Image (cartoon, helix red, strand yellow):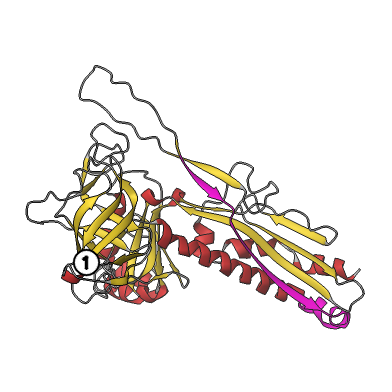
Amino acid sequence: MSNALFTTATFQNANLALLSNAGPFIKLANKKFKDFQTLIGNLGTTVNIELPVRLTSTDSLVASFQGVTQRYASLTVDKAASTAMEFSNQEVIFNVEDYMERFGRTAVLTVATKIEANMASKVESSTYRFYGDATSNGINSHGALAAAVVALKALGGTEDRINGILPESAVPTIVTSGLSQFAVARNNEEANSWELPSFAGADWYTSRLLTHHTAGAIGNASTTAARTLTVVSTDDATGANITQITCTDSTGTLTDANAIKAHDLGEFVDGVSGQTNVRFTMANAQDVSADAKCQIRITANAGATSGTIVLNIAPGLCVTSGSAKRNINTNIVAGMEILIMPSHRCGLLYFAPAMFLAMPRLPEERPFDTKNENDPETGVAIRMYQGSDFGKNLRGTIYDAAWGGLIVPEYAVRLLFPA
């Protein structure tokens, strides 16, 4: 009967609230899907998230019919975490009952930290647009935060709430900047809280779990020239679907297996002699965004051999006029230049509906006593089960959860802070 004591003493709805608010990524993610969080699921369970359809228009009253391709992003429950505690019968009788609420709280926070860190890691692996230069002169003021919001909005898109997640270490400098810039009432607000209030149309949060991205040798070179690659060719000369770009380094001689690391970021350089500045198009695939330089995420490690480097990139680049896939204003051709960003800590700025976290209820662990809880208001779910090792003086309690996360790349910007 001692197992019953475990259940009543430890598994409370308060633990779900604790899990839901354990960090900004869990707290802010869109966790509510139609029936998904209340159904029994497991690793491999998938939900598809619809993305806006892209259409083109013509400068005429004569209709030009086009096919409609439904776009979606798949979110798969592919991660799991658990924390387990063991006790003897004597500990259960004399000690554990008095402390299980405290133990349960620690167990839930342990699982939540694993989920939070995994969600934070998706900033590195999902985003291709970025703001900042990863130096101490980058995102260090309210003006820089406002400029980052402008960068996010540069492609158009939703007018929903915007959230930003910054490293805690960046906040003091930004707050200090604000104290010297704003009116007395706002100064008092920030000085008294030492936090960032809503600003520039965004709500700002902090995290200690933001991923450090370690760039390759080119990104971490000591000069801008050494961080600049020159385009030689692409895998699609027509510009209909460019997913690979062949470049040379600034010397034309570099041989280094670690020249580029997966998730390095690059930006096409303006003002290159004889070349058109590369810009993204707006969400309608036609109008060019003057504020949105073409930026890319390199999806795989790439070595340099005698100065030649092949970059696999996301997103695919398309210049085809009239295509709903068009996302750049000019073809990528030989002589263009790409600046590779240095190592950095990955902050995030995004339209609020564009980050998802799915946590389905897990199945019963028969024959063990199992307690499954899900909160339909927040979408979080966690399982606790317990039992004894038959014939041994051992009782165990396990807390676990499975989840899948997604950040929709086109509605997010990576914020680059010093590593």
Q: Residue at x 21, y 66 (%)?
A: 307
Q: Residue at x 37, y 64 (%)?
A: 301
Judge whether residue 21 can be spotted in this image.
yes
* Front one among 24 and 198: 24
Q: Does the stretch in magenta take in 333?
A: no
Give residue 174's position: percent from left, percent from top: 31, 72
Q: In the visual, does 249 lie left or right of 115?
A: left
Q: Give the residue furthest to the top.
A: 62
**Depicted 83 relative to depicted 73: above or below:** below
Q: In the visual, does 141 lie left or right of 15?
A: left
Give residue 108's position: percent from left, percent from top: 66, 68
Quadrant in which the C terminus appears: bottom left
Please tell me in which quadrant of the rendered image residue 150 appears: bottom left
**Depicted 189 relative to depicted 60: above or below:** below
* Front one among 151 and 311: 311
Q: Give the residue furthest to the front.
A: 306
Residue on which disc 1 sits: 307
Find the magenta span and give its range.
72-99
Q: Residue at x 24, y 44 (%)?
A: 328
Identify which amino acid the numbered label 1 is placed on.
Gly
**Depicted 382 relative to depicted 352: above or below:** below
Q: In the visual, does 298 lie left or right of 276?
A: right
Q: Residues within 10 Å of mark 1 (few under 14, many from 20)?
A: some
Q: In the visual, does 67 lie left or right of 119?
A: left
Per the image, label 1 sits on a secondary structure element best described as loop
Give residue 37's position: percent from left, percent from top: 64, 49
* Front one among 312 and 62: 312
Q: How many marks?
A: 1
Judge whether residue 197 can be spotted in this image.
no
Quadrant in which the N terminus appears: bottom right
Please tell me in which quadrant of the rendered image residue 251 appears: bottom left
Give residue 318's position: percent from left, percent from top: 27, 42
